[in-house]
Amino acid sequence: MPLARGLAVLAAFGPEQAWLGNQEISLETGIPASTVTRLLQSLVALGYLHHDEARRKYRLAAASLALGYAAIADPAVQREASIEMCKFAEATDTYVVLGTRDRLDVSVLDSRVGSQAVLDLRLTPGKRLNIASSLMGSALLAAIPELERCYLQGNVERRAGRDWPMLRRRMAEKIWQVHELGFCMSLGEWEPELATVAVPVCVPEQPPLVLACIGRTARMARARVERELGPRLLAMAQVLQERLASRESGGQNRLAPHHPASLP
């Protein structure tokens, strides 16, 4: 992707033009529509743009921060999430993390830890996790359209080299878990002493986010993860989706992929 044309596409967006379609970008930049299509595909895959299928338009996304755009998650989203994360961490004695995709990584936006949790993970805002080798990455991949996911996995394959077959199997398993259960889990697979549960959060007109709770495997047995922590984390994500969808649509929930469950 020629750098100058890629930057021209990003520069077409602004406060007055938050959402743009292919033809609008072509007219704004003077770049042929067919070339714009290819550029947009690459920019979405790299995390610089977010594509809204319903609108058939694009907006700036998290990776554009590197170029000076304040396009990371809506502060209101993070405020809402922070409140629920604190409750969850205290009630379950776990480490709770909120993240978003930044190119081929997961970028941590916020983290909370229960007062009785014996963990020092230091997953502070700005910390980056490889999307291919983290459970949070698999949860995010499960939330994006299949075409975008396949394009990203192609880039992951080139970066992973000989580790790709193993990573592909793990990602496929975790994506399947999200589609079947609503959440995915890792019980010591990546870190022998750590267990993790992750769930995507689909916020209106925002790139997908991901919530994860992490704890010691000794305190997060499979039965507890499957019966308590996984469903409870999913319920928290649904509460956030419902609340934020209502805020965005003036009371009409446009997401509602599930009926929100009450948190225990």
Image (tube, rainbow, N blue to C red):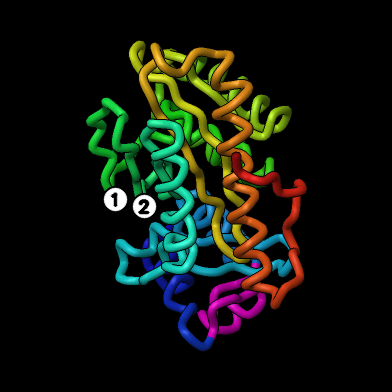
**Residue range (magenta):** 17-33
The residue closer to the viewer here, 246 or 63, is 246
Residue at the image point whose x is 67% and y is 26% from the top = 176
Q: Quadrant of residue 245?
A: bottom right
Mark 2 or mark 1, which is nearer the start of the sequence?
A: 2
Q: Residues within 10 Å of mark 2 (few under 14, many from 20)?
A: many
The amino acid type of the residue labelled 1 equals Pro
Q: Which residue is mark 2?
A: 109
Where is 172 relative to 108, above or below? above
Q: Is residue 18 magenta?
A: yes
Mark 1 vs 2: CB contact within 8 A? yes
* Kind of element beneath mark 1: loop
The amino acid type of the residue labelled 2 equals Leu
Residue at the image point whose x is 58% and y is 46% from the top = 236
The residue closer to the viewer here, 11 or 102, is 102
Left or right of 241? Residue 72 is: left
Residue at the image point whose x is 34% and y is 37% from the top = 114
Q: Which residue is mark 1?
A: 125
Kindly report the distance in space between the C-alpha atoms of the residues bearing marks 1 and 2: 5 Å
Residue at the image point whose x is 73% and y is 58% from the top = 255
